[in-house]
């Protein structure tokens, strides 16, 4: 157990080193979420949205910013090795796949929390936005973090299976998820089969849950619980698929090609 | 009892463009005794690196058995991975991490922590003469220093078995000589079993206790440098290498 925790820490440590040494990367991570919240907030002011409707879209902008930052950390954990051509040294060691992913996720959550606080404060100062009470706000934040973990595992699976070129497809998929989960609108406006797809995304439920606190009638009963249940299923399935992808990449030599 | 034994290893790659089969290993078997330096020799494309990657569990062979430290390594890789390590020529590590940070990261991966890790890092920095470079980023190091860091990283977990893939490739003669003396010292003083590949026959002659010659994924012969030279009536290992390559080409 001690070794496992040290291995988890190893990946948090490496993500921290990369973040510390790349000031442009840090700035970029803050830049896009801040641009997002400003754009959405200003659009809301222009359209003279009511307070609760503005809160509806701002929760979406905050979710998008935090999701983006946290999932980057999870996905980058493998990509740092690919870009450094050091993949084989990592997988030569006696690590569990979960330690690599969890370690990167921890760093992502620290960064995501900073972004969450920064965006919430900005939205409050510039657009009069207020979070609901502590418990739903924490549940909402943790829901975004969990979604980031699942999304980041998607990066791992595709890069291990198809190499670095799959990276672009993964980021495209994450934008598709953002469209489907109803960042700036209720998913009830979707026709089938898009509504069904939206119901398969955990973030849909976390957004629905938090918006209930701004006076919108929730679409789903027990939104937070349902979102969490989906997250558990996807996390377990995701870990299994990442391990299967690693085994496959050890068979076809992809793991070594990622080191070249 | 051998520390490593592999039997009938087969590995076929498929071209990503044409789908045609490339037979990298065609039933290779080797056995390495504890405490020896074992060389894997052969021309380019013979399958040396593929063999090393299979033995270090980075590549899954299509067929064959690998016993490491008496355990079935393919079945329970995590049981044996902590007792081995690898260093390859043209080493690459996280580019923006310093020498110390890189060693710390890999130390963590092997479950080392706190004072034990710091002591191990200090010992390796001293052994590999890296003390002037500890706070330099990896991408600021010379090729020779990178190679010394690669060896330090490969020793972080005090491995019983060390794989060295072309450890002196691309290095200046004086740096190569230094690396070779490190390797010899590791084997003699730390009793680490070493399996290395090399194209440089004087290096092989200087270092290895036994060597296997690989061609087209198959082991042609195994022996001590003395036995191989006698067998081929050669003055040095370079002549052995040339004769074996020609002989294999004729059979082709």
Image (cartoon, coloured by chain):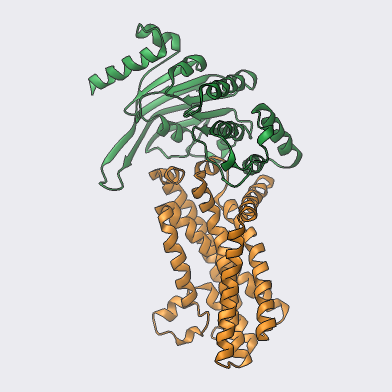
Quadrant of the image occupied by residue A26? bottom right
Please determine whether, in this image, residue A200 is positioned above or below residue A234.
Answer: below
Q: Residue at x 52, y 82 (%)?
A: A184
Q: Percent x, y for residue B206?
A: 51, 15
Give the residue drawn at x 36%, y 12%. Answer: B239
- Image location (x, y in percent) of residue A155: 48, 59
Left or right of B18 in this view: A110:
right
Colour assignment, chain B: green
Q: Quadrant of the C terminus of chain A?
A: top left
**Is residue A19 depicted above or below A90 in this figure?**
below
Colour representing chain A = orange
Residue A223 visible in the picture: no
Residue A217 in the image: state x and y as whole percent.
58, 90
Q: Nearer the viewer, residue B85 or A33?
A: A33
Q: Is residue A76 above or below residue A64?
A: above
The quadrant where residue B199 appears: top left
Task: Please name the residue shown 43% across and 23% down the image.
Answer: B40
Percent position (x, y) of residue B137? Answer: 62, 43
Taking the spot 60% from the left edge, 93% from the top edge, the residue there is: A50
């Amino acid at each position: 157990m001690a070794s496992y925790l040290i291995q988890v820490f190893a990946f948090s440590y490496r993500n921290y080193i990369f973040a510390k040494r790349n000031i442009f990367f840090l700035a970029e991570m803050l830049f896009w979420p801040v641009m997002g919240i400003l754009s959405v907030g200003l659009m809301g002011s222009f359209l003279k949205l009511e307070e609760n409707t503005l809160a509806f879209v701002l929760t979406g902008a905050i979710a998008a910013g935090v999701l983006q930052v946290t999932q980057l950390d999870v996905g980058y954990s493998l990509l740092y090795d690919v870009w450094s051509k050091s993949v084989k040294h990592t997988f030569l060691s006696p690590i569990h796949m979960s330690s690599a992913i969890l370690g990167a996720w921890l760093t992502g959550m620290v960064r995501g929390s900073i972004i969450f606080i920064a965006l919430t404060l900005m939205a409050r100062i510039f657009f009069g936005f207020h979070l609901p009470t502590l418990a739903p706000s924490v549940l909402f934040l943790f829901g975004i973090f969990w979604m980031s973990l699942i999304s980041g595992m998607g990066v791992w699976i595709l890069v291990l299976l198809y190499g670095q070129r799959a990276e672009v497809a993964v980021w495209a998929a994450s934008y598709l998820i953002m469209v489907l989960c109803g960042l700036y609108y209720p998913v009830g406006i979707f026709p089938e089969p898009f509504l069904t797809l939206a119901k398969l995304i955990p973030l849909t439920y976390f957004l629905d849950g938090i918006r209930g606190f701004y006076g919108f009638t929730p679409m789903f009963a027990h939104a937070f619980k349902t979102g969490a249940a989906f997250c558990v299923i996807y996390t377990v399935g995701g870990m299994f698929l990442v391990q299967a992808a690693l085994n496959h990449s050890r068979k076809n030599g992809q793991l070594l090609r990622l080191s070249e | 009892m051998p520390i490593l034994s592999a039997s009938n290893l087969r590995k076929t790659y498929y071209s990503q463009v044409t789908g045609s089969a490339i037979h990298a290993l065609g039933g290779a078997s080797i056995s390495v005794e504890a405490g020896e330096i074992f060389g894997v020799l052969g021309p380019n494309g013979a399958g040396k690196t593929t063999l090393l990657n299979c033995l270090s569990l980075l590549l899954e062979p299509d067929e064959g058995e690998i016993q490491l430290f008496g355990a079935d390594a393919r079945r329970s890789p995590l049981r044996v991975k902590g007792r081995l390590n690898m260093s390859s020529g043209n080493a690459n590590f996280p580019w923006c991490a310093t020498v110390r940070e890189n060693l710390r990261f890999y130390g963590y991966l092997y479950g080392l922590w706190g004072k034990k890790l710091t002591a191990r890092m200090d010992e390796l920095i001293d052994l590999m003469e890296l003390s002037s470079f500890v706070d330099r980023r990896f991408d600021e190091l010379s090729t020779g220093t990178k190679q010394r860091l690669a060896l330090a990283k490969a020793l972080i977990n005090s491995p019983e078995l060390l794989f060295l893939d072309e450890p002196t490739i691309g290095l200046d003669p004086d740096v190569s000589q230094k690396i070779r003396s490190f390797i010899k010292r590791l084997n003699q003083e730390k009793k680490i079993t070493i399996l290395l590949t090399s194209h440089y026959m004087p290096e092989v002659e200087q270092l290895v206790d036994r060597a296997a010659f690989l061609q087209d994924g198959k082991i042609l012969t195994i022996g001590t440098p003395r036995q191989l030279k006698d067998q081929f009536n050669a003055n040095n290992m370079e002549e052995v290498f040339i004769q074996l390559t020609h002989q294999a080409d004729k059979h082709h």
